[in-house]
Amino acid sequence: MKVFFTFLVALGFMASSAGAADVVTQEEMVSGFWSYFEGMNALTLVFVSLLVFAIAYRFYGVFIANKVLRLDANRVTPAVKYADGHDYVATNKNVLFGHHFAAIAAAGPLVGPVLAAQFGYLPGALWILIGCVLGGAVHDMVVLFASVRHKAQSLATITEREVGPFTGTVAGFAVLFILILTLAGLSLACVSAMHNAPWSLFIVAITMPIAILMGLIMRFRRNSVGLASLIGIGLLLIGIISGHSLMQQDVLGWMFDWDRTTVSLAIPAYGFVASVLPIWFLLVPRDYLSTYLKIGTILMLALGIVFVRPDLMMHTFTPFIYGGGPVINGPVLPFIFITIACGAISGFHAIIGTGTTPKMIGNEREILFVGYGAMLTEGFVAIMALIAACTMMPGDYFAINSSPEAYAALIQAHPNFNVVDLPFFEEHIGIDLHGRTGGAVSLAVGMAHIFRNIPYMDHLMAYWYNFAVMFEAVFILTAIDAGTRVGRFFLQEMLGKVHPKFAEKEWMPGVVITSAIFTFLWGYLVYTGNISSIWPLFGLSNQLLATCALIVCTTMLLRLDRKKYALAVSIPGLFMVVVTFWAGYLQVFTQYIPNKQYLLAVLGSTVMVLMVFVLYGSFKKWYELMRIKTTVKDAYGEEVRQLAVE
């Protein structure tokens, strides 16, 4: 209730601060309450977001930790009990926060809010704030808790133990299918950002040897996290500052000027290597190092907004809330819920939360900081991405994110969406920005636009644009390496039921074989596919996975005899069931089938059918658990409705 009350106060503050800039006519503004939000200053939204997230962590996050999950510092975690120096490694909570945040924060919190800006800035802002606090952060924390209590096993294994073998098997295939599509979509977004961008590729490449150096220092020198951080940050800053001038030289510029095909091969190769090497050697230190870059850039953007105080030029609502938009072909309800996934609530986080992270939690109480805290941080990233896109003039935004044909039709229907500043951007950046769909380019332009308004920075717009592209690529790659490793875990578990040796995490032939198979599956889609054929399924499949995780974790809480407190998890889970299947139905029957995109229709329908089986098994288990009137004590002396293998 405290969080909800604070959120209402924050909305009131937003309303009282709005109306600073008259960016549209009165006829275009939404009547009534929402009109107060038109032309709001971006600084107000930054302040409100920080306020909501801080209070949410202090009150609602602590409530989830103490009342719903009852985190116990005395329980031995899998990282300690099964420590092997390879996958199960108890890790400093600050380093683990960096790894977890870097792994979950991929393209979603950057691209999703930018695409959702088509509906206006307010729908995206409200969904990020409400969804992150009450849905996404709870989802991440509960999933991580469930995995830690189940020997750091996957979501499929948790489903098998909490719901039933058949449901667990179906969930395993669904998760594997969704993960392949997710990694392919993320990789294609990365290919689009990095090909023929030597400076950005150079910066991304040098994070790898720097991370290895940091990993060696932290591994073989006690209490050296601070030293490794200083060395890593220092080397990264040197690389960022010197990279632009180095790329102007013929030798280095040619070395990193990779075409689309080369990048499409290099990304899966990196994913394979990162999934095979010990987790402390490359993946964790690289994610930790990337976190400095990610959070540092977001803080720079926040400070730029504080200094520049730009207005949100995008309307509160656009005419496309009812559908027919040039960026997203669907109405704001329910498509806002699948367009903005990461940043509000994301099923991909369940894969990380039952993959690498639970194998590194040294103390169960740290789940609050790592799970809830990292998701709130990602929510703030999503807010900043939304702001960066919405500070552009609406016509410039639509010209970048729409195909030439769609933009021409848009101008005919809405002449007020003509370009304003886009010719200036193109002149100073040096490339044609029209029709560069997908969100990444418009985000980079929006960030560069804010930075160039700082005194003495106006001549550095090309520098800021390329820096933003590199920043986006780092976000994506850190999710690809962790996701590939988790995919390897899934395959090892599934093949281990046929050949027990594969279930042995230290058996290197199994590690290499499963890593190669999984990398090939998503790498083939990257090499042969394109962003328009893969990305549309990402939002649907991602949110279906989040729905699955919330429903399964509710089952676990009911088994633990936490009926009343399980509502904190079941309510967002049931909400996601409704809106996701609603969006999926519209996507398949109003977009894919009418446009003869039958493959996409089959894939989307397959994911939904698999989830129906999972939901049916879970709801049936809920009914069985609710009929149990007596409790028994588990191995730790806690009263539960039913015992389960943990």
Image (cartoon, grey):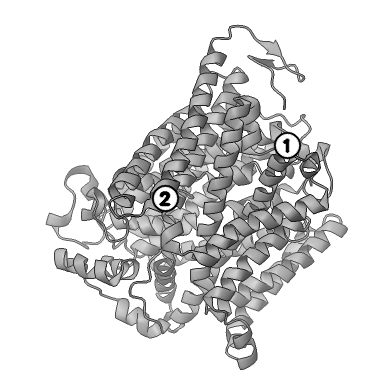
Q: Nearer the viewer, residue 314 or 506?
A: 506
Badge 2 is on which residue? Answer: 340
Residue at image x 51%, y 66%?
Answer: 528
- Residue 418: x and y in percent read 21, 71
Report the disc number at residue 497. 1
Q: Nearer the viewer, residue 526 or 307?
A: 526
Mark toward the start of the polypeptide (1 vs 2): 2
Residue 156 appears left or right of 121? right
Give yes or no for contact between labels 1 and 2 (Cβ–Cβ under 8 Å): no
- Residue 6: x and y in percent read 42, 37
Residue 494 appears left or right of 565? right
Residue 297 appears left or right of 423? right
- Residue 391: x and y in percent read 34, 65
Residue at image x 70%, y 31%?
Answer: 149
Disc 1 to disc 2, C-alpha distance: 37 Å
The crowding category of the residue bearing disc 1, from other C-alpha atoms within 10 Å (few below 14, some 14 to 19, many at least 20), is: few
Q: Amino acid at mark 1?
A: Lys
